Image (cartoon, grey):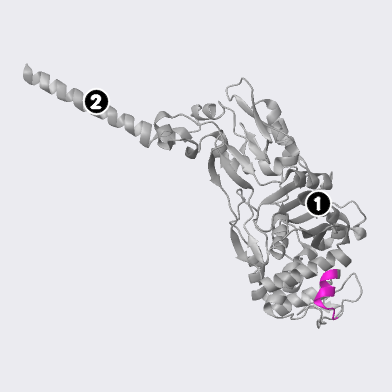
Amino acid sequence: MTRYIRRAAALCAVLLVALLVNATRVQVFQARSYDDNPANRRQPIARYGQPRGDVLVGDRAITGSKDSGEQLRYERTYKNGPLYAPVTGFASQVYGTAFLEGAEDGILSGSDPMLAPFPLWNDFTRSQNPGGKVVTTLDPAAQQAAYEGLGSRRGAVAAIEPSTGKILALVSTPSYDPEVLSGTGPAVAEAWARLNEDESKPMLNRAIRQTYPPGSTFKVVTAAAALDAGVVTDVDMPTDSPNPYTLPGTTTTLTNEIEGCENASLRYAFEWSCNTVFAKLGVDVGLENMTRTAANFGFNDRKLRIPFAVAPSNFDVRLDRAQLALSSIGQFDTRATPLQMAMISAAVAGGGAVKSPYLVAKTTTRGDATVSTTGPRTLHQAMNPSTALRMRELMTDVVTEGTGTNAAIPGATVGGKTGTAQHGIGNAGTPYAWFTSWAEADDSMGASVAVAVVVEDAAAERGDISGGGDAAPIAKAVMEAVLGF
C-alpha cells in the first residue's frame, strides 16, 4: 500500500510541476503574443480605462481626457485642436494614434516601463501606470502668430531655435480638430471619411510631410556651395554669367525677371534673385560638391525624426548639367519641407552647423518626475564658419534693400531669402510663395529664431505672387513673437 501511495504522490508532484511549467509558459513567455492578439479586448479596455497623459506647451496642457462611460472609457480631448493638430496628431479608439500621440504613446498611455518606480514589478502584476506628460519645445506665441498669419490659405510654417534645434512653431493649414476622431460612435467614422475626402487635405502635415519645389530659397544652399568650393571668392566681384543663360547641352534658355543680372556679383544676384547667375554657379560648382552641400544641410536624409518621421527633402544625386542648373535654383526635382528650409536658415544663423530639430523637451511622470530629456545635437557642419558669416551678410541685404524688405523688424537684424516656385505641368500651377529667414535682437548675442514659410495658394494674381509679398509678412510675425516685440 505504501508503494502505491508513493507512486500517487510522485504522479501528483509531476502533474503539479507540469501545471507550473505551463502556467509560466502562458503567463510569462507567451504573454506578449496574447496581449497583442486582436481578439484580446482586455488590453484596449485597460488602455482606455484611465485618463491619458497630457501634452504641454509652455506650462499649459493642450490635451485632456473625458469619461464617456463606454467600455473604452476615456476619450481624448484637445484645447485649440486645429492650432496644435500638426504637433499632437490624434489619439482615436478606432483609428489609432499619429504624430506626438503616436511617437510618445508609451508615456501618454502609461505603458512605458520607465514610468514605474520598479519597472519589472508591472510585468508580474500586469498593472498599468498613470499616463505621463510630454513637454514640448513650442513657443505658444509663435505658434499662434504662424496660424493666424496663414489664415484660410493652404500652407505651412516651421520655426526653430538655431543654437539648439528646438522647434518653436509647427503649423499647417487648413487644419482640423483631432477631437472629432475620439470615441467609438458613428460620428467618428463620419468625421474620418469627411477629413480624408476633403480636397484641401486638412490632415496632411504640410510642415513636415509635404515637400515642395523650394524655388529661389534654395539659392542659400547654392551660394554656400559656391563659396565653400572656391568658385566664388569675393561676393562683390562680377560673375561670368550671361543673360539669358543657355542650359548646358540644350537650346533652352533661362532668363530673369529683373534687370542687371548679366555678370552680376553674388551679392547682387542673391539680393535680387538672378536665376541665370545661380544656375551657372551650380554647374560650375559641380554635381559632387552640390550634392554634398545639400546633404550636409539635411537633404536626402531618410532617418530624421522629431520624434515622429519627417518626409525626406530631395536633391537628386544623378543629374546632367542642364538638370543640375535647374536644380540649383530650386526647380527640376529639388523638393523640400518647410522644416528643411528652416534648418537651412538656422545653419546660416548658427555659424554653419545644422542642429537636429526636436519637438519634445522632456517627458515626465504624472507627478512631474523627469523620465527623459532631449538636448542639442549637431547633425552636420553644412558650411565653413567663414562662409556662414558671408551668407549672413547676403541674407541681411535681402531684407534691408532687396526682395525681402517686408520682413524687416526694427530693433533686430533679420536675414532672409524669398522664393517663388513654379510647379505643375508646364509650370501651369499657381506658384508657391516661399520665405526663409532668421532674426537676432540687437541686444542679443545670437539669432533667436529661424523660420520658413510656404504659401500654396497666395491671394494674388499669378504674376504678382512672391515670397516677399505673401510669405515674408507671416515670417515677420512669427519672428516678432519669438523676440517678444
The residue where tag 2 is placed is 16
The residue where tag 1 is placed is 480
Report if residue 319 is visible in the image: no
**Prevailing secondary structure class for the magenta stretch in the rendered image:** helix
Report if residue 294 is visible in the image: yes
In the structure shown, which secondary structural element does the residue marked by tag 1 occupy? helix
Residue type of the residue flagged with mark 1: Glu
The percent coordinates of residue 142 (x first, y second) are 76, 47
Tell which residue pokes out farthest to the top in this image.
1
In the structure shown, which secondary structural element does the residue marked by tag 2 occupy? helix
Q: Which residue corresponds to the image point at 68% horizontal and 66% vertical from the top-left?
A: 351
Distance of label 1 from label 2 (alpha carbons): 73 Å
Name the quadrant containing residue 399: bottom right
Name the quadrant containing residue 350: bottom right
**Residue 267 included in the magenta stretch of the image:** yes
The mark that comes first in sequence, 1 or 2, is 2
Residue type of the residue flagged with mark 2: Leu
Residue bounds of the magenta highlight: 263-271
408 in relation to 263, above or below:
above
